[in-house]
Image (tube, helix red, strand yellow):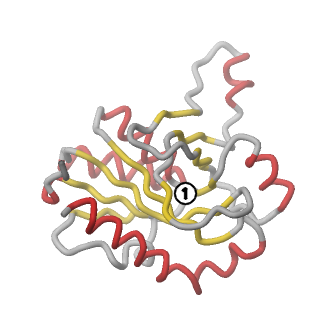
Amino acid sequence: MSPDPSRVLVVAATKAEAAHVPDGVRLVLTGIGKVEAAALTAAAIAESRPDVVLNIGTAGALRPGLTGVFLPSTVVNHDLSAEAIRALGHEAVDEIAVPGGDGSVLATGDLFVTDPGARDRIAERAHLVDMEGFAVARACQLAQVPFRLVKVVSDAADDSALEWPAVVDACARLLGHWLRDELA
């Protein structure tokens, strides 16, 4: 059963990624990065109390051959020093299960990944990398609002990431098609 489009909140980092979101769907643009994504998602949830949050956006592929749309089952905060925080006796949430996913793992961090060494380290734990997914998921988790992450591969998390402006519209079209199908 599809969610009621009037009760859905779509969250995207940029206008370009959300260019093909269907009319009539509530959309929040957060800006790039975890802080902006968490803050604006939390505020939008408090304001509208949606039935579900759909975080759409682009992601870098951390492994060869990954293309298309992914619905991650797990999202990790890859640039949090969770082990060190836990060693100090504090809780550190650095992994969230995402219901209804496809088995892929998304790594989120404020690092714009273009370095092959950084990519390979993150790939030990994840398939894809972005800059907002974990933050949106954590805001939803704390507000007890169901959520899904919908990411389309835009690059190979290397120098090709710098070509994002040239490919983002094609990615946004795929995200728009996915949303129309999901909300039909």
Q: Which residue is disc 1 drawn over?
A: 33
| Residue neighbourhood size for the residue with mark 1, other residues' Cα within 10 Å, grouped as few (<14), some (14–19), many (≥20) | some
Tell me residue 146's x, y (percent): 30, 39
Rendered residue at 36%/59% (across/down): 11
Q: Seen in the image, is 71 located left or right of residue 22?
A: right
Tell me residue 104's x, y (percent): 56, 46
Q: Secondary structure at mark 1?
A: loop
Residue found farthest to the bottom? 166
Indicate the quadrant where residue 8 lies. Answer: bottom left
Rendered residue at 48%/81% (across/down): 170
Quadrant showing the C terminus:
bottom left
Q: How many marks?
A: 1
Q: Looking at the picture, does residue 16 appear above or below residue 65?
A: below
Q: Nearer the viewer, residue 84 or 174?
A: 174
Q: Seen in the image, is 36 located left or right of residue 163?
A: left
Q: Looking at the picture, does residue 154 appear above or below residue 10?
A: below
Q: Looking at the picture, does residue 122 appear above or below residue 20?
A: above
Rendered residue at 68%/24% (across/down): 85
Rendered residue at 61%/17% (across/down): 90
Indicate the quadrant where residue 115 lies. Answer: bottom right
Q: Nearer the viewer, residue 110 or 121?
A: 121
Tell me residue 4's x, y (percent): 13, 54
Indicate the quadrant where residue 9 lies. Answer: bottom left
Tell me residue 29's x, y (percent): 37, 65
Q: Seen in the image, is 30 located left or right of residue 73?
A: left
Residue found farthest to the right? 117
- Which amino acid, by three-letter code, is at mark 1? Gly
